[in-house]
Amino acid sequence: MFIFNIGYSFYMEILDFDLIILGSGIAGLTAAIHATNASKGQIKIAIVTKLHAMRSHSVSAEGGISGVLYPDETHDSTELHAYDTIKGSDYLADQDAVELLVKNAPTEVRFFDHIGVSWNRDDKSKIQQRAFGGMSIPRTAFAADKTGFFMMRALYDEVSNMKNISIFHEHFAYNLLIDKNKFVGLSVLDLATGSSSIFKAKTAIVATGGASRLYSFTTTAHSTTGDGIALVYKAGLPLKDMEFVQFHPTALVPNGILITEAARGEGGYLLNSKGERFMEKYAKSKMELAPRDIVSRAIITEMKAGNGFKHEESGLGYVNLDLRHLGEKTINERLPMIKEIAQKSIDLDPIKDLLPIRPAAHFTMGGINTDIFGRVLSDENKTPVNGLWAIGECGCVSVHGSNRLGSNSLSQCSVWGRLAGNAVAKYLELNKSFINISKDVVSSEERTIVELLDRKGNTNPYFIKSELQKTMDENLYVYRNKEDMLKARRHIADLKNAFKDIYIQDKGKVFNTNLRDVLEIENLLELAEAVTICAINRKESRGAHAVVEYPNRDDTNWLKHTVIYKTNNGTGISYSPVKITSWKPEPRVY
C-alpha cells in the first residue's frame, strides 16, 4: 500500500490487489470463488460494492435458474434449450455464446446444490423444474420464489470463508483507469468516511448489473443505476445493443415490485377488464408463457384498446393477474413471497384477490461489449482490453439478443462467473506485474470528488433524475416511435447540460448519500443517451425494441449488433454481425 499527500486535508491510499471484482451479485461472487479455487487461494482479491454485498440486487431474483438437468426423463436437450433461447432473442443472440450457456448451465445448478442452495425437490429428491416463458419444456430450477436470495446466501457464505478475499462494502467506484489498453485500477470513494482511494490491480471483473433505474416504473432496486456500464463507456470503451431494454410484463401496480414469471409458470392467468384471458389473441400456443416482449406488448395493446383498468391514485393503467385458481397450498409452497409482497404492499391476498399488474423496466439486454469469454473489447476489431472482463447483466456477450428468456439470467451470471474467474487465474500466471500509477493521475482522481463537492450551481440534481426517468418512461417504453425518441434525445442533451450546473447540498464526508446519488445520476445520463441514440438508429422492430414506424423485423438490414462508443465529437455508432451457427432466422410465432 502506498499513500500520496496531494495537498488536501487527507491522504489518498493506493491499495494493491491481483484482482478487483466490481459488484457483489451472483456473477461477481461466483467469479471470486472460481478465481480463488483455480489459483489455490493465491490470488489477492478485492470485491468492491457500493452496497453491503448481501444487498446486491441478485437477492431479488425470484423465479429460478435454467438448465437441462434430466434430459432422459423430461425429453429435454441442450439443443432445445439453445433453440428456445435463440428464438426468444428474436435471432439477435450470438449462437456460439448461447451454446456455451446451455452446455454449462446444468453444472452451475449442481454447483449451487453443492454449496447449500435449498432447491425445491420432488418425492424422489430430484430438483424440481417449473415452466417459464418461451421455454418448450419446464427447465427452471427454483427455491420457492426466493431463488436469488438463496443463491446469494450460499455464495456469500463461501466467499466469507476465503482468506484471500477482502470485501469492501459501501465503496463507490467512480472512475476506471486504463493505460495503453490495459486495466490499471479503479478510483473508489469510501462512503463511510468520504475518503477516496485508488484500487490498483493486474485484473478486474466488472459485475455491477443493469441500468433499469433509467425508468421510474421498474422492478429493480434504486441501486441499479448501471454504474459499471457507465464507467466503461466513459473510459472510451464501447457498449453493445443498448436499445434493448426488457420490460417485465407483471410488475405490481402502483409500486413496480416484481411479480415473478413463476406465477404464470405455475398456471396464473392474465385477464383484461372484460375478464378475458387475452393472451389467446397474441400467442395462442404459449398463452401467458409467451416470451416477455410479446406479453408486455399484448398488455399495452389491451390497455390502449380500452380493455384495461386505471389505478386511481397513480393514474397507471393495468390488467389483472389471477392466481386464485392455483389454490392456497400451491401459493403458500411455491409463491410465498408473492403472497407476502401483495399483502404487505397493496393489501391484497392472491389466494382470493386479483393482482393489478403492468410492464416495468426490468433487464438490460445490452451492456459492455465483450467477446464470448467476457473479455471487454476496446474497438471495432474486437481487440480485448488486457486484464478486464465484464460479466452478468452489465456484460453483453450477447446471449440474450433483443429479448431475454426468464431464468436464463441466473444461468448467465453463474456460467460467466466461472469462466471469468478461471480465465483471470490463468491470465495472472503469465502477467505478474503492475503498471505504475503516476502522482498526476492520483491527484486528478482525488480532485474529481473535491471539485464535485465544491460546485456552486443552481440546479437540483434530483430534478434532473426525475426528468430523466419521466422522459424514458414516456418516450422509450414498450412501444416507441420516431418523434418521441427524438424528443427524448433532445431532452437528455438538455439534462446533461443542466448537470454541469448542479449543486450538492450535503458537504459532509460521512455517508454522503447526496454525493453518491449525484455520481449515479451522472451515470444514468450517459446511459440514457446511449439507449436513445441506439434506439433511434435501429429502424426495425425486434424483441424488446418495438417501433411503430417499423413494425416488422428486418433481417436483411438489421441482423446485426449496435456498437456505440464515445468520440472526441460526441458518440459514434458501428455494427457487428450476429454469430449464426446452427439456427437460421425464421418467423417468430408462438
Image (cartoon, rainbow, N blue to C red):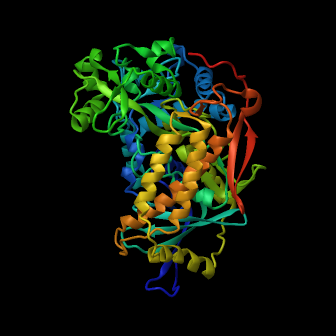
Residue 176 lies in what quarter of the image? bottom right
The quadrant of the rendering that contains the C terminus is top right
Residue 341 lies in what quarter of the image? top left
Counting from the top left corner in percent of width and height, residue 252 is at 34, 33
Residue 88 lies in what quarter of the image? top right
Res 47 seen here: no
**Residue located farthest toward the right when viewing the structure as drawn:** 381
Asked whether 572 or 201 is in front, the reply is 572
Whether 214 is drawn above or below 551: the answer is below
Whether 186 is drawn above or below 560: the answer is below
**Residue located farthest toward the bottom when viewing the structure as drawn:** 7
Res 257 seen here: yes
Q: Residue at x 64, y 42 (%)?
A: 536
Counting from the top left corner in percent of width and height, residue 423 is at 63, 50
Counting from the top left corner in percent of width and height, residue 473 is at 47, 42
Q: Residue at x 38, y 65 (%)?
A: 514
Asked whether 474 or 391 is in front, the reply is 474
